């Protein structure tokens, strides 16, 4: 896979919204937003709450953050210099999340990934997932992550940084 750029993020957001009428909005977070390039495009797709609930119910074990905040610098090094390791530990979970999202959204996300040669990661959330730049903690029961500290911190970081892209 090639490095992902902001242009790729715009492409994916536009294509996904064009191919699925249940996506209301798309937001970008992660390395492409922060650095202008990265290993993948990280998108939040805003959908109706029932669809977001279905995705989280099926994907919750593949979403749970295993590497805590204090390890983020190490994760960035692994992603940059040891992509084979990153792929071995992360790719299967990411592909399962994408497969569930594809089914719920009615669009084959992996075919877009193959066409573009760029990796993507998507998270389905309802419109009220945050207030301003803060995580709306009232949605946590919907996610099923409960009080899993590192996953909640991940969602808080995403809420603080995600930007509208489509």
Image (cartoon, rainbow, N blue to C red):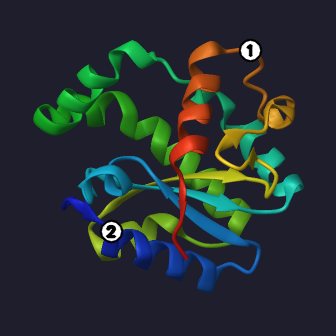
Nearer the observer, 135 or 17: 135
| Residue 67 in view (yes/no) | no
Q: Is residue 49 left or right of residue 117?
A: right
Nearer the observer, 63 or 111: 63
Tell me the residue at 63%/14% (across/down). 149
* Outermost residue toward the left in this view: 81
* Outermost residue toward the front in this view: 132
Point out residue 23 in the picture as x, y percentages from the top left corner.
Answer: 71, 71
Q: Residues within 10 Å of mark 1 (few under 14, many from 20)?
A: few
Give the distance between the C-alpha atoms of the residues marked 1 and 2, in whole angstroms.
33 Å
Tell me the residue at 20%/28% (across/down). 78
Pointer 1: what residue?
Answer: 147
| Disc on res. 6 | 2
Q: Quadrant of residue 87?
A: top left
Point out residue 43 in the picture as x, y percentages from the top left corner.
Answer: 52, 57
Q: Tell me the element at label 2.
A: helix
Tell me the residue at 61%/43% (across/down). 159
Q: Is 35 situated above or below 149?
A: below
């Amino acid at each position: 896979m090639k490095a992902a750029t902001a242009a790729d993020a715009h492409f994916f957001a536009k294509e996904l919204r064009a191919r699925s009428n249940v996506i209301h909005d798309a937001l970008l977070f992660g390395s492409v937003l922060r650095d202008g390039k990265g290993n993948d495009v990280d998108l939040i797709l805003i959908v109706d709450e029932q669809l977001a609930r279905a995705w989280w119910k099926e994907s919750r074990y593949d979403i749970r953050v295993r590497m805590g905040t204090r390890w983020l610098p190490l994760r960035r090094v692994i992603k940059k210099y040891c992509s084979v390791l990153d792929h071995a530990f992360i790719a299967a979970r990411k592909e399962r999340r994408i497969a569930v999202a594809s089914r719920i959204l009615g669009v084959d996300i992996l075919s877009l990934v193959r066409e573009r040669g760029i990796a993507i990661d998507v998270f389905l959330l309802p419109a009220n997932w945050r207030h301003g730049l803060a995580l709306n903690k009232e949605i946590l029961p919907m996610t099923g992550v409960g009080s899993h500290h590192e996953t909640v911190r991940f969602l808080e970081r995403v809420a603080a940084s995600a930007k509208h892209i489509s």
